Image (cartoon, grey):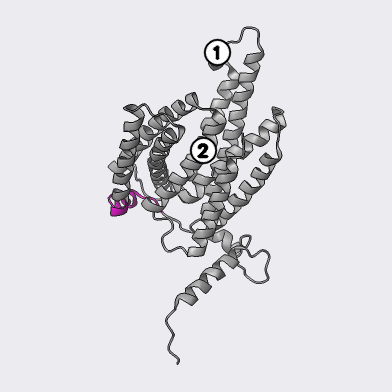
Amino acid sequence: MAALAPAGPGDAASAALDELSLNFTYGAPGVGNGSLSGAWYRRNQIHLFGVLLAILGNLVISISLNIQKYSHLQLAQQEHPRPYFKSVLWWSGVLLMAVGETGNFAAYGFAPITLIAPLGCVSVTGSAIISVTFLKDNLRASDLLGMTLAFAGTYLLVNFAPNITQAISARTVQYYFVGWQFLIYVIFEILIFCILLYFYKRKGMKHMVILLTLVALLASLTVISVKAVSGMITFSMTDKMQLTYPIFYIMFIIMIASCVFQVKFLNQATKLYNTTRVVPVNHIFFTISAIIAGIIFYQEFLGAAFLTVFIYLFGETNVGQNTTRFK
């Protein structure tokens, strides 16, 4: 019997190319491993459920934003406009936004951060489509091109996001929480946060990039804690109770505190700068910070092929750049 030769760099590259070609296989004869094959579906159905929750949640958010905008437009046309918070229509939009954010929260329990976070572009593109259809906003050629390219980038993200299924238990979160990768990341993040906060508070520098970087640094902690809390709740429902562990409540407190301070800095940015500039830039900063957090804390790209990572990042860049086309 011939001895097996050790796999070399050429074999690894060939395996990576085979993996990529399988991701682009549609309706090929045989069992198949392509994007629409049964084998691919069975391997990724949990992730697809998370993706579906995130897409539906973001679509509901886009509807809620347009309902609130329509409410403001109606009130502005009245001779004696009442406060917006007394409008039933405005509160309907707030309720829908809560439903959409709940869907996003649940999605993190079923799929990697690097897959769910970039899907926030669905709310941006969905809001643009709804505003054009129902609020009669103008649709420019650049908007249409941006939507098309953003959807193409989203397809690449869904196809080439890390194919890992993690059971997020309390012990898993504890293990990652004290890992040296996360500790170095947190120290580095706290250092940058303190420097930016010093310039913001002491020097009075309120540039949009400074404010949104502060939001993004907090968002990375929010995403980590949201996935931990959502994952432990999911694990409690499907396997063993995890809500008795102290780490659950530590992550819950981090989630709430980081969200509160995010809103504070984001509100400051929207007061000083036009919303059409703040929203797309904030989306890009948030997505980048969320992906970095997922890679470092949950090690979501561990063992992934280089070409898979490259195409994923290309898809993310495509989504991010074209989201900024919408105004």
Check disc 1 and report the residue beneath it. 83
Question: Would you say 327 lies left or right of 189 here?
Answer: right
Tell me, yes or no, if residue 315 can be seen here.
yes
Q: Residue 133: where, in percent of width, then height?
A: 71, 32
- Judging by the rendered image, the residue that carries numbered circle 2 is 281
Q: Nearer the viewer, residue 223 or 13?
A: 13
The earlier-in-sequence mark between 2 and 1 is 1
Q: Is residue 175 magenta?
A: yes
User: Picture quarter containing residue 97?
Assistant: top right
Principal secondary structure, stretch drawn in magenta: helix
Neighbours of disc 2 within 10 Å: few (<14), some (14-19), many (20+): many
Amino acid type, residue under disc 2 in the picture: Val
Quarter that holds the N terminus: bottom left
Is the Cβ of the residue at disc 2 closer than 8 Å to that at disc 1?
no
Q: Quadrant of residue 246?
A: top left
| Callout in the foreground (2, 1) | 2
As helix, strand or loop, the secondary structure at mark 2 comes to helix
SS of the residue at dot 1?
A: loop
Give the magenta range: 167-181
Name the residue located 50 percent from the left edge and 35 percent from the top edge: 101
Q: In the rendered image, is residue 111 in sight?
A: no
As shown in the figure, which amino acid type bears the numbered disc 1? Answer: Pro
